[in-house]
Amino acid sequence: MEELFPRTVVGGLSLPRMIVGSNWFLGYSHTSKAKDHVIRQHVTRERLTDILTAFLERGVDAILWNPNPDVLAAMKDAEQRAGRAMIQVLNPIFNLVPGGKPEQEPDVVLDACRDLGAAICMPHQAVTDALTDKRARVIRDLDCYTRMIRERGMIPGLSTHMPEVPLYADRQGADIETYIQIYNAAGFLMQIETDWVLDNVIRKAKKPVLTIKPLAAGRLLPIVGLAFAWSTLREQDMVCIGTMSADEAKEAIDISLQCLSRPPAQQP
């Protein structure tokens, strides 16, 4: 029997320490429009079902995504194949000021997340970072949104591209159970040095951290990016990774399990 992936706990919910990412499903390559087009052509519903089934069969049963009908359909197909449900971590964008599109109002968007069966709701960095006041070192209005998330039976988290945000959330006692943070060996899309983020954000965070971009959007080899992440993160932290095939999913899992069999590295 193949080894199932190690798990952590977020807000009382058991999650695999590897989370399925969705950028590669939706054509966000962080490379070029041409590469985006290649991804969208390649990742058909059938291939996406194969990818999600490969993850589910090894116990990687959580996905970070924005609602998309093709991903939803493939997820349902994969759940039927694997005989296991996928835990949904939704990453929605909604209006922050009056006058926007009615379908993007916070209550409408959060209702939709609940209706899709989201277990965790982490407002997108377009929301979180817009609310962040660096001068006052607070995330304004965050309690309003976390309360709305709780009222709908979901666990609140937050997504950010700013390294300060988890520190601010902890400092203000925000009702947050996990945070998204960019973290990779190349420093890709990271606003400050990788070691500073590790020592002063991830290792000091009061809740588990969900790291994204471990392979720097394909700029790092899987063994390089995953070995770095797993050898430096805490036992409660997670890595989100997207793949373009079932074989890539299996490879990422195998490399990760090998890395996790060794003790983590310590920063001197």
Image: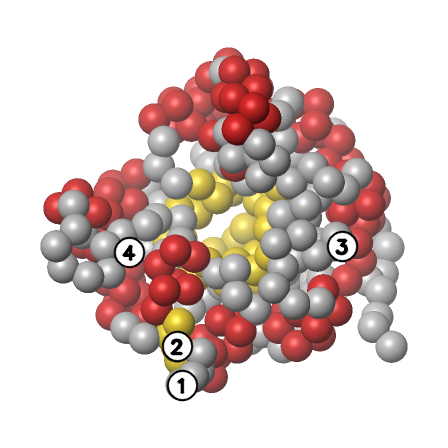
Classify residue 1 as left or right of residue 137: right
Label 3 near label 1: C-beta < 8 Å?
A: no
Per the image, the residue denoted by label 2 is 133
Mark 4: few, some, or many residues within 10 Å (few <14, many ≥20)?
some
Residue 63, percent from left and from top: 50, 41
| Camera-nearest residue between 268 and 137 | 137
Q: Residues within 10 Å of mark 2 (few under 14, many from 20)?
A: few
Query: Badge 1 local density, few (<14 within 10 Å), some, or many (20+)?
Result: few
Question: Is 39 situated left or right of 121 in this image?
Answer: right
Tell me residue 238's x, y (percent). Answer: 62, 54
Give coordinates of residue 136: x percent, y percent. 40, 85
> Can you identify the residue that label 3 sits on?
185
Dot 3 surroundings within 10 Å: few (below 14), some, or many (20 or more)? some
Amino acid at the residue labelled 2 = Asp
User: Are dots 2 and 1 in contact, CB under 8 Å?
Assistant: yes
Q: Is residue 8 left or right of residue 96?
A: right
Quadrant position of the C terminus in the picture: bottom right
Of mark 1 and mark 3, the one earlier in the sequence is: 1
Amino acid under label 3? Ala
Against 173, residue 88 (above or below) is: above
C-alpha gap between disc 3 and disc 2: 28 Å
Alpha carbons under labels 4 and 3: distance apart: 36 Å
Provide the residue designation for mark 1. 136
Whether pointer 3 and pointer 2 mark residues with C-beta atoms closer than 8 Å, the reply is no
Of pointers 1 and 4, the one earlier in the residue sequence: 1
Q: Is residue 15 visible in the rendered structure shown here?
A: yes
Q: From this view, report whether residue 170 is shown above or below residue 213.
A: below
Residue beneath the point at 44% across and 22% down:
74
Q: Which residue is mark 4?
A: 153
